[in-house]
Amino acid sequence: MLKPRSTPTREQVNLDGLWRFALDGAARPEPWKGPLDTRLEAAVPASYNDLFTDPAIRDHVGWVWYQRTARVPRGWTDERVLLRVDAATHEGRVYVDGVLVAEHVGGYTPFEADITGHVRAGDEFRLTIGVNNELSNVTIPPGTVTVARSGRREQQYKHDFYNYAGLARSIWLHSVPPVHVTDVTITTGLDGTTGTVGYSVETNSSAPVRVRALDADGAEVAAAAGATGALRIDGATPWRPGAGYLYELVIEVLDEDGGGVLDVYREPFGVRTVEVRGTEFLINGEPFYFTGFGKHEDAPVRGKGHDNAHLVHDFQLLEWIGANSFRTSHYPYAEEVLEFADRHGIVVIDETAAVGLNLAVQGGLTGRPHDPTWAPENFGAATRDAHARHLRELIARDKNHPSVVMWCLANESSSAEEGAREYFEPLVELTRELDPTRPITHTAWLGATGDNDLIADLFDVVTVNRYYGWYIANGDLEAAEQYLEHDLRGWVEKFGKPVMMGEYGADTLPGLHSVWDVPWTEEYQRAYFEMNHRVFDRFEAFVGEHVWNFADFATSNGIHRVDGNKKGVFTRDRRPKSAAHALRARWTGLNGRK
Ligand code: GCB
């Protein structure tokens, strides 16, 4: 799905701001049928949960309603009018005046509706968006709604981050001409110093297409005619980690005699290659070593609401600490994040929202028996269909970002349990069909080892999440070191693929200190990382280290969580813990190579 952009033939109106807001049932029965009778206003973009003091809102399970009026610019008489929701977490319904114009399930990917037939240029309309935060075993991520003894409905989920909900990304009204570009796919290669660019443009009705590639100064460097084709850029400047050079593909749709331009769309791209060869991860043919983090979209008050100030600051901190990459754990991030990474040469592992497909996590860790994960009544064909739909939407959205070098299909699924292979094989096939250019991975949880894992061979890179010294051998870094080395050796020797650490971390309370190995202290977090790094450096096949987590983040309540997860190297308000300085020393020294 194309991102709305302003071009000579396309305009956009941003609908962010304060919207009327009500829980389902608190305003009129069918809230889309008239003005929402409420005193509450919610900020968009933002998760709604932490905006208000009322616990009934924070803990609400079900629909909430957002409403505002919007005006269609009077110059749009001859245009198609589209409404785009960048994300409605987890399900959205959009009404224009009283009419339902779009429905979408999936909280981290965009959707849009052509509302031309429902609005008039120059006129105002009432825009109502319903958002539902419920998760079930056929949503990605999954969850279960239970009824507490008090009678209150509660959302249960297996993932370790707060179930923030609402309109956390921008809402757009935008115009496209009657004949327009609907999609573009750009793939790139390097032939010596020449950049090769394959492109494929889709339009809503057949019309001649021409394309031009512009360099970063806006100078034309290649051009071609036809909806699909190839361009060559002599002496191309590649997109590289640390130097995000971007070109732009200007796509023009022409009228039948080829004279008039009906539509213009511009898509930035970078010329780069990504390849896994043997045990190496290559970007532009050069071995790349990932340093960085699993992150979250998470901030006080806004929850998962996208914010450009936080965006800039987080990237500043990534640069400060010498991180060259991050994983969008555990869901696709706002498109603005990927665009920023494109421009600044930060490498991204783009992860789906498939987190929590693992009924062994709690049962397994405590040794209790658990229900089978991959059974039809838990995660079966219907879950997989939802997962496949989500993958399609993710790849459609993010396929042209040079920063994205790998897809991560799921986090810590129950990959050592019978049925895992049957679940994942078709998803792997689908991903390779949708994008033959990027490697793929899956992060393995503690219960999956080189010995018992059933799916790692389907992927290009083995990513493992390990917490020796935290969940296992807590406080005993000597034992942890032995466990970790043994565990990693199992993967390295069995698969002969690049192996990376997708998560390793220790909860740490800033200000807590000790001269001994005492968990939760700043010294322990440092020592824990040092131990991990000693082990990583023993493996030739190791291609990266992503610390869990960039910053402290909100979770649901639990006896092992004190006001959220504290494994951040930065606090939730982005102050460095002592380990940040140690990581900085290591990573600035490594500089993307081992
Ligand atoms: C994990 C999960 C991550 C958790 C982390 C932890 O394995 O992938 O979502 O937050 O462990 O801190 O427990």
Image (spheres, helix red, strand yellow):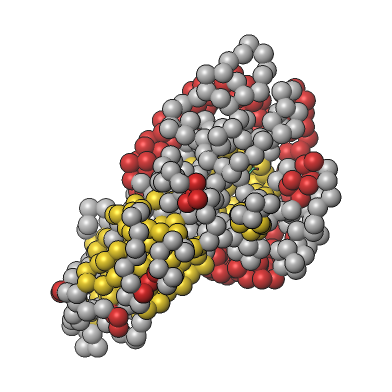
What is the quadrant of residue 301 in the picture? Answer: top left
Asked if residue 576 can be seen in this view, the reply is yes
Q: Position of residue 29 (x, y in %)?
A: 44, 70
Residue lying furthest front: 150
- Residue drawn at x 63%, y 66% is 138
Q: How many marks?
A: 0
- Is residue 172 visible in the rendered image? The answer is no
462 horizontally vs 53: left or right: right
Q: Residue at x 75, y 32 (%)?
A: 472
* Residue 567 location (% of width, % of height): 57, 33
Relative image position of residue 447 (x, y in whole percent): 76, 45
User: Closer to the camera, 516 or 287?
Assistant: 516
Quarter of the picture for ligand 1? top right
Question: Residue 52, how many percent across, how many down?
Answer: 41, 46
Q: Nearer the viewer, residue 129 or 534?
A: 129
Q: Would you place residue 247 above or below residue 343 in this image?
A: below
Task: Say which residue appears at 70% left-offset and 46% top-offset.
Answer: 445
